[in-house]
Image: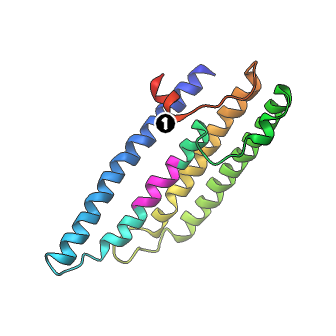
């Protein structure tokens, strides 16, 4: 279990690094858009489509990290009012459902990628499938992270853990 968690720690760090790098690229693209539009008087039309693709590549994998770090949207008031033993099994059920959702997202996104791979994004000249690859990656990561959460919930002696992004980076 410790090795699995360490591997997922590496995945999380890689996702955060890639997202940060993509964010810098996004800012550079938007700077080029503004420069082209207002200084050169020649708007680079490809930037808007590339920026949309970049946002997908940033937001979706980071959302998957949110499942692991538990900074995703959740309502804990009801669960925390219950006895510790019940809290654990509610956490297991919730994490299992999230994992199943991630798996379904990965599988169905793969179908989308396969369906549109031969089509090209007009302004970029790359496959339309790249629009759905971040969704597929997000689903796969959510599945892995949910499996880890379920295992931790089952193996933990006390109640469900409230991990945060700080905990992962300060360890």
Give the main secondary structure of the magenta stretch: helix
Image-based side of 33 in relation to 164, left or right: left
Q: Quadrant of residue 28?
A: bottom left
User: Which residue is at a point 69% across and 44% down the rendered structure image?
Assistant: 99
**Residue 158 position within the rendered picture, expressed as x and y whole percent measured from the top left:** 75, 20
Residue 93 seen from this side: no
Image-based side of 97 in relation to 41, left or right: right
User: Which residue is at a point 72% across and 33% down the rendered structure image?
Assistant: 150
143 and 119: which is toward the camera: 143
Image-based side of 93 in relation to 37, left or right: right
**Residue 166 position within the rendered picture, expressed as x and y whole percent measured from the top left:** 49, 31
Residue 162 covered by magenta stretch = no
The stretch in magenta equals: 54-62
23 and 129: which is toward the camera: 23
Determine whether the residue tagged by mark 1 lies in a helix, strand or loop: helix
Q: Which residue is mark 1?
A: 11
User: Which residue is at a point 40% across and 60% down the rendered structure image?
Assistant: 54
**Residue 39 position within the rendered picture, expressed as x and y whole percent measured from the top left:** 14, 75
Q: How many marks?
A: 1
- Quick one: which residue is furthest to the bottom in this view? 41
Residue 13 seen from this side: yes
**Residue 92 position within the rendered picture, expressed as x and y whole percent measured from the top left:** 77, 35
């Amino acid at each position: 279990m410790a090795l699995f968690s360490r591997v997922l720690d590496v995945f999380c760090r890689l996702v955060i690094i890639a997202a940060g790098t993509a964010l810098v690229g996004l800012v550079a693209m938007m700077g080029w858009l503004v420069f082209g539009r207002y200084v050169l008087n020649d708007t680079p039309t490809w930037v808007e489509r590339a920026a949309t693709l970049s946002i997908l590549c940033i937001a979706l994998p980071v959302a998957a990290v949110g499942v692991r770090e538990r900074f995703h949207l959740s309502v804990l008031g009801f669960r925390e009012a219950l006895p510790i033993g019940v809290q654990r099994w509610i956490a297991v059920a919730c994490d299992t459902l999230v994992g199943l959702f991630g798996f379904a997202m990965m599988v169905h996104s793969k179908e989308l990628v396969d369906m549109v791979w031969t089509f090209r994004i007009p302004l970029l000249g790359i496959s339309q499938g790249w629009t759905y690859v971040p969704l597929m990656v997000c689903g796969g990561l959510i599945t892995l992270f949910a499996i880890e959460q379920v295992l931790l919930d089952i193996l933990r002696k006390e109640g469900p853990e409230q991990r945060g992004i700080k905990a992962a980076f300060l360890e």
